[in-house]
Amino acid sequence: MPPHHGPHDGPDEFTPWPEALARTYREAGYWQGEPFGAWLSGLARRYADRPALLTPDGPVTYRELDRRATVQAAALAARGLRPGDRVTLHLPNTPAFFELLLGLLRLGVRPILALPAHREHELGYFCAHAGAAALVTAADPERLALAARVQAGLDRPLPVIALGENPGTWEGEAVSFLPSAATAPTPDFTPPRMNAGGVALYQLSGGSTGTPKLIGRTHDDYLYSIRASADLCELGADTVYLAALPLAHNFPLTSPGTLGALHAGGRVMVAPDAAPGTAFPLIAAHGVTHTALVPALLQVWLRALEGSPHTPFPSLRCVQVGGAPLSPDVARQVRPRLGAALQQVFGMAEGLVNYVRPGAPDEEALGTQGRPISPHDEVRIVDDHDQPVPDGTSGHLLTRGPYTIRGYFRAPDHNARAFTPDGFYRTGDLVTRTPGGALVVTGRHKDQINRAGEKIAAEEIEHALLRCPLVQAAAVVGTPDPWLGERSVAFVQVAFVEATPGAPDLALTLKRHLRDLGLAAFKIPDRIEPLPALPRTPLGKTDKPALRALAAQPVAPSTPPTHRSRP
Ligand code: OOB
């Protein structure tokens, strides 16, 4: 009998693994048939009164975290949410993220894990595309105003559930305020029975197309990646994990991230942002042992330590770096300057995560992006015709395995391109394999910009630019930047505007246009350049290589960012 995934799961909503592979993953013990709610109850039994979260109000024990998740599951059920519903979850980096996330998972309601930087363009799309039953957010004035804009942009009523008290700025009716679980009594609530093979939550694809894709991760596959990551990164009860990146992102959430640290019985500390001024005092005060950064933030941290005579954090054992290419020069500075081991992580929200194993020789630790988590991760490196390339040659990375999706949510046409007929995901990354079996990311074959680890789908910005009546054609490319990895440059062909003299005004106008559409700030192009016409290939497609060459021509020198938090 095919596994049941949930009340709303048709073939476009969830692409199951073929039964033979599913059996293999179950027999190998990867998929344990345990949903997140039961996993959390298990942690509460195992680690009971040990601290799970270190918060400004004091520690929250495992037992108490489990109780708070139940409080919120009951409160969300009382507000009409039902197992199988989808909601968009949009929260800042605060410890309360966990009571809501785990409450939703316990209730079988599937959160779409939006990033804090997402605005009405993205949130509205997630709610519309997924038929969300609610937008779950925090009760601060800015988020409530954003929620109102999302509601206004939809053609059906969207309930908003906001964690916290009404700040007094909200006058409408369509918001239900959810008290913090800390002081709420324990409800009489029996969680629904759940199928661990069903979708637990939706991660978001960095993507390369006009609309972001939703990635349904099952209880079974996601928990496997968390347990296996925690084990191979050697997390334990003495781990103190600092989450400085946005909590909802796959890297700080599960690789091994906060959930991996909880799985191991460790403690989790949430930084509201990743600025050195915020994160450094937390590391020192709480004896942080592990944290995760993108390369751009690592550079900000290293700069902040410049001139400091000794490594400042005796407790820090491991700094994980991933999400974007890390230069070996920067990699080399981690041990002497931060006094911690560097662990490179090359992962993706779709599944596959590679880690440099603890204790690996320098050559591998500094110069590779590690190897897959699982012996059952299948990796193919192929040429443009899907034929395997010899080891040491760069090729397209394709992968399938026990925690890599087989299809995006409601995207049949895209799925036909993004997956091979035998179910390998086309990652869009170019890699080589070293003789030792580690992967090295050599480039990218997807129309995406990786700006400080934040992924920008070129087509999404091009479509948004084309909605401005001035713009006749638009193309967005990335250009190398020593601090951000890449910056985004938009080339536009415009009507009625002199190509060069009006350039600064045009750039401002178009940036305002994009902001008015409600795009996340990291997606606003760093530069906007008018061109009389976009260069075309002989087939009439925009010639992006030519535009990349044009974008790379020298302009004003780049300055190091002081700090801009990731979403
Ligand atoms: C992580 O996940 P996403 O979904 O935001 O982005 C995935 C893409 C990869 O396909 C690759 O293009 C790039 O980000 N990437 C890297 C990298 N790690 C990710 N490129 C070069 N070097 C690396 N180390 O970014 C993510 C998810 C889980 C763990 C870590 C990162």
Image: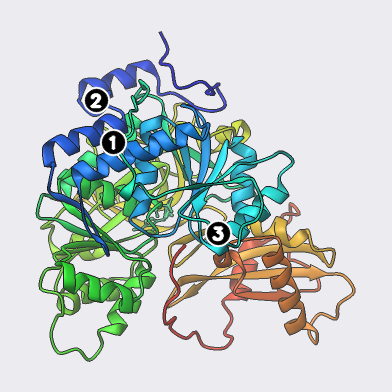
| Amino acid type of the residue tagged 1 in the rendering | Leu
Q: Please, is residue 409 above or below residue 518 in the view?
A: above
Can I make out residue 257 in this image?
A: yes
**Front disc: 3 or 2:** 3
> Label 3 near label 1: C-beta < 8 Å?
no
Question: Which residue carries the number 1 mark?
Answer: 223
The spot of residue 151 in percent (x, y) is 67, 48
For label 2, being within 8 Å of ligand 1 is answered: no
| Farthest residue, direction right | 496
Task: Give the image's coloring scheme.
Answer: rainbow
**Helix, strand or loop at mark 2:** loop
Q: Residue 32 occupies which quadrant of the picture? A: top left
> Label 2 near label 3: C-beta < 8 Å?
no
> Label 1 near label 2: C-beta < 8 Å?
yes
In whole angstroms, how far apart are the C-alphas of marks 3 and 2? 38 Å
In whole angstroms, how far apart are the C-alphas of marks 2 and 1? 9 Å
The spot of residue 527 in percent (x, y) is 63, 76
Q: Please, is residue 417 above or below residue 25 in the view?
A: below
Considering only order in the chain, which callout, 1 or 2, is on the residue closer to the N terminus?
Answer: 2
Q: Please, is residue 175 above or below residue 271 in the view?
A: above
- Is residue 3 left or right of 291 when viewed as pictured? right
Label at residue 143? 3
For label 1, being within 8 Å of ligand 1 is answered: no
| Mark 2 residue crowding within 10 angstroms, few (<14) / some (14–19) / many (20+) | some
Question: Which residue carries the number 2 mark?
Answer: 32
Ligand 1 positioned in quadrant: bottom left
Q: Residue at x 56, y 40 (%)?
A: 134
Between 19 and 379, the residue placed more toward the observer is 19
| Amino acid type of the residue tagged 2 in the rendering | Gln
The spot of residue 162 in percent (x, y) is 51, 50
| Amino acid type of the residue tagged 3 in the rendering | Arg
- Is residue 240 left or right of 147 when viewed as pictured? left
